[in-house]
Amino acid sequence: MRAVAPLLIHPALLLVTLALSTALAVSVVPVAATAPVVEAGHAASGPGAVASPPFAGPDGKTGEVTSSAGPTPVAGTAGPVGGAGSQAPASAPKPIVAADGAPAGPGAGRPSAASAAGLGVQSGALASTGTLGAATVATGGASSGSADTFAGAALADRNEQLVVVVPSGAGQTASRYPLHANIVSTTFWVGEIFNANLSDGSQVCSTYDGQWAFHHTGITTGITPAAASGCAGSAYGGCDGVSSGTGAAFLCATEARTSANGFLPTRQPAPLQNAFYLDLPFDDVNDPTAFAGRCTVVPWAATLGLSHCADPGFSYLKNRWVRIVGPNGHVCYGQVEDAGPSSGALYHDAGYVFGTTNARPINLKFSGDSSQGAGMDVSPALNGCLGFTDLDGDADHVDWSFTERADVPPGPWLRMVTTSQVSG
């Protein structure tokens, strides 16, 4: 074995070494990350449910009217239900979160209450009392009628972390689109039958989806008669609210929504499409004036591709994101999924919808404000998120602007994102 000579240190050098060691002996304290503050949303006032009239009732109630004219059937999408059945959309679900749970796309990197959850993607559960053509719907089964995305069971189990309702002006990116201020907004809901005797009096279908109620809920209890004024051949029974009755006695009522479960319906399965939906009075598919001029007036038409200008199977408005400031001061987000409020041949209000002068809607109806007609309908989820005073009233006012998907912050509106295009 090789001997090692002892290490000799001069006494003065030893003192210096000890002093330096003492100075550098600093305790390292881990810095805990501050948890994001999640503000509870404001619940809509008024207990109970507000019902819509019977399916076959001769008289309609007073309220908003939304465009529900059946869109032109498009090859490869769900077709009218009139014995032939409904085909599932061909497009596959697209995840809205990355594999690590972080927001996907241009908005990646924003803090999210659901980040680091490692979420997968699955279809929402369905409940049904029947079948719709070739698409069999069974309780607890996977969706065969929706091309939209559900962000994992972990989100469903942690709804309190989904609710990120941000007060107005709380550090959010300003919209690059014009603000429409002090606009009267009413409420509508999938499955509502506003007036069975009007072509645009039912939310069983929408102007962009002839099977809206089925695609949104996965439920059908019957088919609207071919002789019906509106939504003929559409499956009914699906309801974004409280359903009751069957056949001619079917009802779909609205209800108060709260942040307790992410503003989702309390007596129905989780929606298969975004519960945060709205409409604006510009039907760029079925209104001839809007369709003819849409590639001129829609600001993002070129971005989505001008090759769609003459394609009635494509909408530049459907699924578009909108930023809304509610009566409670909260900022909530939703997607355009129908056209309204309006009536007759007024579904091409480009001056209001896309204008830069904060113009009032040309529609003068469905409003409790004598100075203007209603200019937007919002879903029950948005009704609760925005703090509307009534479940189905006409006196609430909002500020709104279009926004880009990349500028939509995390929140319950991203739990399910609607991606399907025009469907017959």
Image (tube, helix red, strand yellow):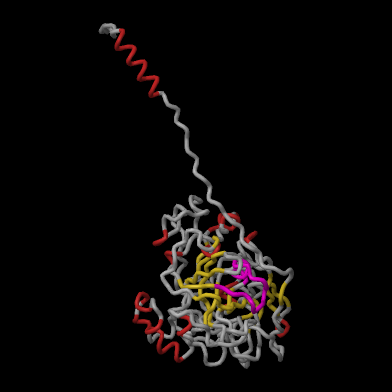
Front residue of 279/27: it is 27
Residue 233 location (% of width, % of height)? 59, 86
> Is residue 61 on the magenta stretch?
no
Front residue of 249/226: it is 249
* One can see residue 72 in this view: no
Q: What residue is rendered at 66% in x and 64% in y?
A: 43
Q: What residue is rendered at 57% in x and 79% in y?
A: 133
Query: Magenta segment, which residues?
Result: 380-398
* One can see residue 360 in this view: yes
Query: Height in image: 32 above or below 162?
Result: above
Left or right: residue 88 versus residue 177 is: right
Residue 219 location (% of width, % of height)? 62, 74
**Total numbered labels placed on residues in the image:** 0
Residue 1 location (% of width, % of height)? 27, 7
Q: What residue is rendered at 60% in x and 55% in y?
A: 160
Front residue of 373/89: it is 373
